[in-house]
């Protein structure tokens, strides 16, 4: 019994010791040298994607049109929020998004991203271009103004939460003919140059902590 307990304890200590190590694959060359490389998983991306596929959007539209529950009630809740109103007034944009443990300007992009995403959904469901134009106005404004994300360690929350919501709105709207190619490409550059470095930096370095810290 003691032997079994000792082996279990040793196993537990070994597992714990691995808790703060990077996830890596190890390969050994013919010369006997060991090299490490981060794991990578790739898969083809189909537009529209991210949170909603085309099948999802088609299903939403059909269920709402038929008045089927719970889609109908869900849609009524969606259209009943102030963020979905065509009279919604933007909280931003700001040239820098800041998020710290005590506050910051992130609340502006938080609200505007919610409005853009909800308007994009309503456009997809109803075909009412006024909602697409409203959402695109928000996306274009942020893309042409914001140049950085900053703050304490909470900056990563801003990059991940609101960047993801803005990207979902854009992914739904990418097929809308009213979004000019110039503005669409400007938005892509905005996501690549402002949100991606902040998000990727956190995922890569974890603010200088081990993988399991957060």
Image (cartoon, grey):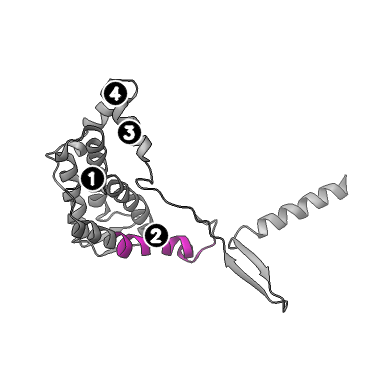
Judged by depth in the image, the label closer to the viewer, 2 or 3, is 3
Q: Which mark is residue 168?
A: none
Pointers 3 and 1 in contact (CB under 8 A)?
A: no
Residue at (51% x, 63% y) in the render: 209
Q: Quadrant of the N terminus?
A: top right
Image quarter for residue 66? top left
Q: Which numbered disc flags the more N-terminal residue, 2 or 4? A: 4
Position of residue 73 relative to residue 203, above or below, is above
List the single residue furthest toward the bottom.
31
The numbered disc on residue 58 is: 3
**Residue at point 28%, 25% (across, down):** 64
Identify the residue position indicated by label 4 in the image: 72
Give whichever of 52, 141 is nearer the camera: 52
Q: Is residue 56 above or below residue 100?
A: above
Give the foreground label among 4 and 3. 3
Q: Give the mark nearer the N terminus: 2 vs 1.
A: 1
Which labelled disc corresponds to residue 199? Answer: 2
Badge 4 or badge 3: first in the primary sequence: 3
- Disc 2: CA contacts within 10 A as few (<14), some (14-19) or many (>=20): many
Question: What secondary structure is found at the residue carrying circle 4?
Answer: helix
Residue extending farthest left: 87
The residues bearing labels 2 and 4 have C-alpha atoms spaced at a distance of 35 Å
- Boundaries of the magenta span: 191-210
Q: Residue 103, percent across and down?
A: 29, 54
Q: Is residue 129 left or right of residue 70?
A: left
- Prevailing secondary structure class for the magenta stretch in the rendered image: helix
Dot 1 or dot 4, earlier in sequence: 4
Mark 4 and mark 3: span between their CA atoms? 14 Å
């Amino acid at each position: 019994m003691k032997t079994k307990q000792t082996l279990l304890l040793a196993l537990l200590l070994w597992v714990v010791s691995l808790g703060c190590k990077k996830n890596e694959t190890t390969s050994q060359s013919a010369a006997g040298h060991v090299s490490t490389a981060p794991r990578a998983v790739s898969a083809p991306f189909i537009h529209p994607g991210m949170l909603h596929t085309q099948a999802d959007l088609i299903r939403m539209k059909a269920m709402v049109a038929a008045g089927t529950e719970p889609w109908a009630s869900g849609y009524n809740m969606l259209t009943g929020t102030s963020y979905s109103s065509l009279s919604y007034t933007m909280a931003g944009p700001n040239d820098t998004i800041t998020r710290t443990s005590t506050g910051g300007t992130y609340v502006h992009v938080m609200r505007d991203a919610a409005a853009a995403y909800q308007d994009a959904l309503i456009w997809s469901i109803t075909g009412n271009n006024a909602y697409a134009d409203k959402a695109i106005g928000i996306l274009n404004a942020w893309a042409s103004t914001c140049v950085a994300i900053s703050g304490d360690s909470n900056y990563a929350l801003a990059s991940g939460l609101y960047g993801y919501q803005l990207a979902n709105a854009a992914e739904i709207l990418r097929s809308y003919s009213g979004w000019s190619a110039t503005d669409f490409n400007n938005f892509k550059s905005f996501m690549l140059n402002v949100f991606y470095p902040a998000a990727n930096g956190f995922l890569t370095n974890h603010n200088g902590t081990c993988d399991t810290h957060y």
